[in-house]
Amino acid sequence: MTGIYAGFAQEESKNMSDNIKWGIRERMREGKVCLNCTRFLGYDKDKNGRLVVVESEAVIVRKIFELYLNGWGVRKIKKYLEENGIKTVTGKDVWSTSTIDRILSNEKYVGDVLMQKSFTEDILTGKRKKNEGELDMYFIENDHEAIVSRNTFTMVQKKKNKK
């Protein structure tokens, strides 16, 4: 009997999840920005969930882009940030090279948003998967205030793609 109830509960949970996902995807189709991150370096959210620049952090983001364009690799940038006591957005003293690489690739820093880059593949495990065409992605240009110029961002992407 317990197994039957567990099966009903699992199916109800799946139905609720599907309904929530449908609502989120409908808002994306309508061009309404849906961000699942709480904070990331350089931005915070206002009471309406819109991205707003945190200038004290934006300076760090700009520095990362500047150093990269000046020929510094992510390991050298990591060392610079740590030696200068610059903390991560979560307050850690140690930076990861993958975080720096993601900052350099994140379209949000130029004011754009690409939604549904990843999705939850299995609701039971909560495992996320990179979206490689399984689901539609939604791109909104000039959604919020940029931290770096479009020119700077484009130059960084070209430089990253050469490597």
Image (cartoon, rainbow, N blue to C red):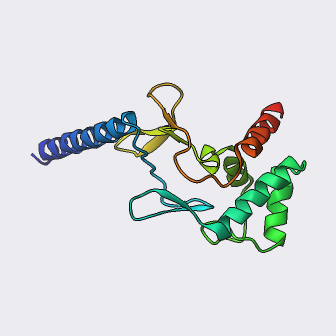
Q: Is residue 48 above or below residue 30?
A: below
Q: Position of residue 14 (x, y in %)?
A: 25, 40
Q: Quadrant of residue 132?
A: top right
Q: Is residue 49 left or right of residue 141?
A: left
Q: Is residue 58 above or below residue 141?
A: below
Residue 36 or residue 13, whichever sits in front:
36
Q: Position of residue 103 (x, y in %)?
A: 68, 51
Indicate the quadrant containing the N terminus: top left, top right, bottom left or bottom right. Answer: top left
At a point 82% along the width and 58% down the height, the residue shown is 77
Q: Position of residue 161 (x, y in %)?
A: 78, 33
Considering every residue shown, the one lying at the far top of the view is: 133
Indicate the quadrant containing the C terminus: top left, top right, bottom left or bottom right. Answer: top right
| Residue 95 in view, yes or no | no
Considering every residue shown, the one lying at the far left of the view is: 1
At a point 45% along the width and 39% down the height, the residue shown is 119
Q: Is residue 140 above or below residue 72?
A: above
Residue 149 or residue 130, whichever sits in front:
149
Residue 30 or residue 100, whichever sits in front:
30
Q: Position of residue 22 (x, y in %)?
A: 29, 36
Q: Is residue 158 left or right of residue 23?
A: right
| Residue 122 in view, yes or no | yes
Q: Quadrant of residue 64?
A: bottom right
At a point 84% along the width and 64% down the height, the residue shown is 80
Residue 17 or residue 116, whichever sits in front:
116
Q: Is residue 18 left or right of residue 70?
A: left
